[in-house]
Amino acid sequence: MTDATPRKRLLIRTWGCQMNVYDSTRMADVLAPLGYAPTEQVEEADMVILNTCHIREKATEKVFSDLGRLREAKRERGGDMVIAVAGCVAQAEGAEITARAPWVDIVLGPQSYHRLPEMVARASRAAGAVIETDFPAEDKFDHLPETAAPQGVTAFLTVQEGCDKFCSFCVVPYTRGSEYSRPVAKIVAEAERLVSLGARELTLLGQNVNAWHGEGPDGRPWTLGRLVRQLAEIPRLARIRYTTSHPRDMDADLIAAHGDTPALMPFLHLPVQSGSDRILKAMNRGHTADDYRRLVERLRAARPDLALSTDIIAGHPGETDADHGATVALIRDVGFAQAFSFKYSARPGTPAATMAGQVDEATKDARLAEIQALLRDQQAAFNRSRAGMLAEVLVTGPGRHPGQMAGRTPWLNPVHFDGPASLTGQVVRVAITAGHPNSLSGVIGTPSHATTRERPAA
Ligand code: 5AD
Ligand code: SF4
């Protein structure tokens, strides 16, 4: 290397949602001009960023135990290590972090990532930690440099941040602030750039992604369906997904886009949280269980092969056996291809934390176990139902075994099959031979009875 800048090493650990994964790549981009190159080894790291998640209690505790280990690593390097805590734990518990872990140099909330270089410089001069957890009026995206690193076949693109829904149990409105939509032109430009760098599938991200809205180049108000249709025009962009959606923001145009935009994949993550109207009300979700069922019907009418994923919480305050039964019934009625389910955990500062009728741990455990067993069965059945299909598979790279390749179906299942590495980035037809609990296996190119309506490789 002829670069005069001494190489420094940066380790980023990421917890939580895909938004954090995306933000971590952007933090690496911001620090690259300062000479920071990525590493996986904590011993050689000049800077460590923990990009944290505050959504459940366990995630927070893991951050503190990681900080304990980092204290040792920093000591072994004679103190020569910048430790930063980013993400929603930083946003929510900045003061607690500096009190419990005074060896932390930087605490920064999700809206402050563009200020990292300045904070690194300040940290080297400061006696205590540098803390930045305001919600600035400026748009952080205006200040973040563009990704130049080679792009994988699949990429994330944040289009929306924050949430105004204030579900009773959730910290996001407090840690990520109110809903903000990025402008159309910036999203389209970033999408085009990601595709030019090699991305063939884009997942549009937002805490409430389907609340995204903006003004189109035609001067008219756009919602997410219109944006998806616009992005679908980008040559060589084969696939579009978006996550996470709220049932209340699923408008007619977005539903229609599932039917008329082949690049929009037939998979939707649509959290329902509970199947009981009483609990949905206590959760401040703004919809009933039947509203959700009807929404699913409309989506499936638009796109019959749509696979659904959801989030479920077991044991929200006030939840009775009957409410739990209603959740189980809703899961049975809808049939999910995939799902995430959680035991309710009280998050300080949220309304549910102080509600009457907190459910005891043993009951929560039992309800969660029942829900998870059902969801596991549904996922296994969905995967088995793919066997015999000829699926359009986006090849993402080599598989685990020699000669094996990996990819994903339109329904987001990982697939393994034998094939040459040169297929990476292409959409190929794979005959699915078996559905396993978490993945599929297949053989390239054997015709079968079913195909999807996806656009083939450009
Ligand atoms: N307890 C349990 N699960 C929660 N989630 C959010 N907050 C809590 C909480 N306090 C779950 C919701 C959400 C997902 C990302 O995490 O299901 O959709
Ligand atoms: Fe949290 Fe509800 Fe907003 Fe989702 S919609 S981020 S669960 S407050």
Image (spheres, rainbow, N blue to C red):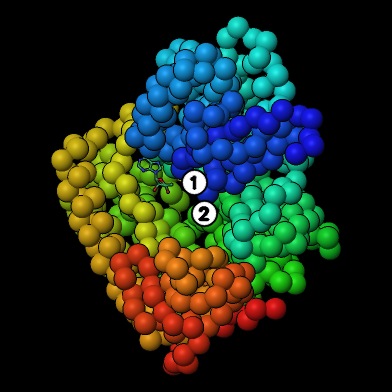
Residue 32: horizontal and vertical position, in percent? 70, 36
Query: Which residue is denoted by mark 2 in the rendering?
Result: 244
**Residue at left 57%, top 9%?**
128
Q: In which quadrant is the N terminus drawn?
A: top right
Callout 2 touching callout 1 (CB < 8 Å) = yes
Amino acid residing under circle 2: Thr
Residue 458: horizontal and vertical position, in percent? 70, 78
Looking at the rendered structure, the secondary structure element under dot 2 is loop
Residue 17: which numbered mark, if any? 1
Asked whether mark 2 and ligand 2 are closer than 8 Å, the reply comes as yes
Residue 152: horizontal and vertical position, in percent? 62, 58
- Where 363 sits versus 351, above or below? below
Looking at the rendered structure, the secondary structure element under dot 1 is loop
Image side of residue 1 versus residue 131, left or right: right
Taking depth in this image into account, of 120 and 335 the one nearest to the observer is 120
Quadrant assignment, res 427: bottom right
Taking the image in four quarters, ligand 1 sits in the one at top left
